[in-house]
Every structure is written in structure tokens, then in C-alpha cells.
Amino acid sequence: MVVLVTGAGGQLGQSLQFIAPNYPDIQFVFCDSSTLDITNLNNVKQLFKQIKPNFCINAAAYTAVDKAESEPEKAYLINVVGAKNLATVCKEFDTILLHISTDFVFDGTKKTPYTEEDIPNPEGVYGQTKLDGEQAIQEIWHKHFIIRTSWVYSQFGNNFMKTMLRLAAERDKISVVNDQIGTPTNAVDLAEVLVKICTSIFHLPSSNLFGIYNFSNEGQCSWYFFAKKIFEFNNIKINLEPIPTTSFPTPAKRPGYSVLDKSKIKNTFGPEISGGVKYWETSLNEIEKE
């Protein structure tokens, strides 16, 4: 089985590289933007011709939520044109596409976990381009898994956990918003789920399981409580202050509530995946010990 991973330099791409040795039967091909420009259709075709992947995990994305407000063309190019190019070439080579999307496709006004059936209503450029990318894939190639996830962090790349640890080394006091609720997701757990989907589907001659799925760790919290646990698990004593979103204005609006319902992915793939859905605190605690 050949699995192409785009965005290999990002935190999900690095998390997939981290777990790859546990899957010796899979031939992973990792490409970052310097070895594969997903916004260039010919570039994508050439690589597919060369490696003929069974699966393509698209971990490449423009994820700078605030910057996207002033760089909409760049966000669109990567999140929409890139997704469209991959779907087009996946169709040509009969490659199954696994595409990562986000809780930002929702406006966050709901008070119960979002299901795959809920109507998206993104409120910023980033969320809109991710939704447009999803829709482009759906129109082009039916053999896809679109995985919506939330609050991704890991020991790799840039993320909230690493920002908090860096700020704690520089300051005596940190203020974090306490009225946005979601679920932190360890990128390594997400990587495991993506590989498990590939291995499950590889052994099914025909699959009607394609479509949109939610995946995150279990539980929910505010950014403030997430930060509190990061410091607690790292034995860092710091003055942490909870603040409302109104006290921390950002160019892009964040969903006030973006917990994802994972019933569909657990019911579809069974114990193989549902057994691996850890509570976010457990996963955070474990990552610190690696």
C-alpha cells in the first residue's frame, strides 16, 4: 500500500512521520511544499504518475486563521485550488483522498456538539476556504474522506500548546480566553485514525463509507482550561488569568462553541477507531512524557 502525505512539514505531517515506523507494510511518501506544490496541477500529476498512490492524505493547508483575513488569495490557493487539484488527480489515478478540514466551517452558535449533518456557516476567510475546499472535493471525486477536526496541537510545528510553553518562559502572567469551548486534538491521535482508515478501506473491495466525518479527542474545555492543564502537566507555576473573547480581539472571529460529535466515525469504523479516541486530558498528559 502506497500512501502519499502532502504537507509533510506541518504538525500533522510530522505526526504521520512520527508513527510511520509502526506501519512497516505501508510505503509512505512524504512531501512538503518544496517537493510537491499542490497548487500546481501538473506538479501533482507528475508525482502521481511516478508513485501511483493508493491513498493521498492531504495534510497541506493554509491555517493562519487571522492572517487569512488579509491574505484571502493565498488561503484560497492552498485550501481550495490545492484541494481541487488533488481531487482531480486522485480521480484520474483512482486514489482515495483523505482531506483534513476544520471546526471553523461552523459559526459556533450551537450549544450541542456539531454533527456531519449540521449546516456549515463559516465566519472568516479561513473557514470559508476550508468549506470551499470540501465542496470542490465532493463535486470532483466520490472516493474521499473529509475529516473535520478541532484545536490541533502536538510536539511538532506551531500550535497553542507550544505557544503557551514559550510564553510561560517569557512572562509571569498570561491571559487566555475562557468563553470559547471546543476539544483539543493531539495530532498524533489524528494521524493514527487517518492511517487506520486507510488500512480498513484497503481491505474492502468496494466501499460505501466515503464522506464527511468528525474526529477530535473526547471531552471539551475552554482555551483557558486547556492552558491550565498544559502548565499543570509541565509543573509550571504561572499567573493564568481567564478573560472574555471581547478582551482579546482578533482579525478573525472564532466559533464560540465548536465541539464535534464523533458518533459517525466511531459507529462506522468500530473498535479500531473508537477504542483509540482518548480524552483530551489523557492525550495531553501522555504527550508531555514522550
Image (cartoon, rainbow, N blue to C red):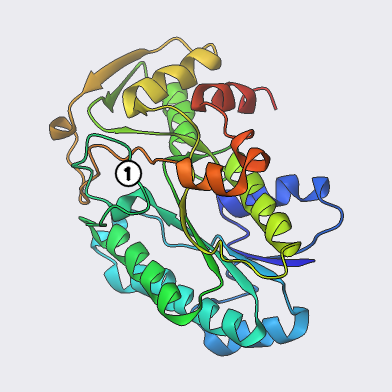
- Residue 137: where, in percent of width, then height? 45, 74
Front residue of this view, candidates 236 and 277: 277
Residue 134 lies in what quarter of the image? bottom left
Which residue has dot 1 on it?
114
Q: Quadrant of the C terminus?
A: top right
- Residue 73: where, in percent of width, then height? 31, 74
Residue 11 in view, yes or no:
yes
Depicted 5 relative to depicted 92: above or below: above
Q: Is residue 113 left or right of residue 216?
A: left
SS under mark 1? loop
Q: Which residue is located at x 65 percent, y 73 percent?
A: 35
- Residue 103: where, in percent of width, then height? 35, 48
Q: How many marks?
A: 1
Residue 156 in view, yes or no:
no
- Amino acid carrying label 1: it is Tyr
Q: Quadrant of the N terminus?
A: bottom right
